[in-house]
Amino acid sequence: MKLLFFAELSGAECELLLPSLQKENFSPGDVVVREGSALDRIFFVLSGRVRQEKILGITLEATGLEAWQEKELFEEITAGNHFGAGGLVEPAPSLVDWVAVEQSQLLSLSFPRFRQILRQSDTLGRKLLESLCRTLHESGRRYEESFAMQVTAVS
């Protein structure tokens, strides 16, 4: 599986990076990152799908005996893509839940390991920073485009 974030890395650079990555498996419905918990790493989807979810509230049935959560579903991240890039810039609480939609295998790179790579390897560190900047720029553009479409729809 080719990960877009690492597209500019050579084979040797990938080998150098590999020990810094953590591999995890998730079953459908498993929470990868819970809203409010520290998002201090970037996640790469090797296989499966992961979805952003936001719990909007709890609805009680008329009898008051049954309750369920109402969720808003946002984007899905598929194999080859990533999420949580902001965690490499400044770790902060997650604003949403990230939940496995199907059996998924993820790699992650933590903030401390990323900082260590920046200190130890100029070339690899520069390439990772360029990829991070590109990712954050693209994310900002998608947000702006989405906002512009909403404003246009309201007008």
Image (spheres, rainbow, N blue to C red):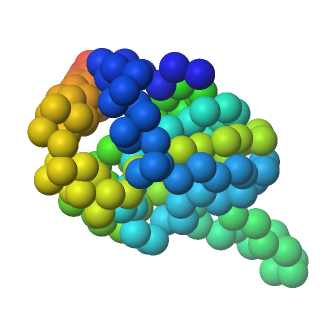
Residue sticking out furthest to the bottom: 65
**Quadrant of residue 40 within the rendered picture:** bottom left
Identified at 76% across, 39% down, the residue is 102
Whether residue 33 can be seen here = yes
Q: Position of residue 39 (x, y in %)?
A: 39, 61
Q: Is residue 120 rendered to the left or right of residue 28?
A: left
Identified at 40% across, 22% down, the residue is 11
Q: Position of residue 62 (x, y in %)?
A: 82, 72
Height in image: 14 above or below 89?
above
The one of 20 and 151 positioned closer to us in this rendering: 20
Identified at 59% across, 57% down, the residue is 32
Whether residue 70 can be seen here = no
Which corner quadrant holds the C terminus?
top left
Identified at 59% across, 28% down, the residue is 78
**Quadrant of residue 1 within the rendered picture:** top right
Height in image: 82 above or below 4?
below
The one of 153 and 55 positioned closer to us in this rendering: 55
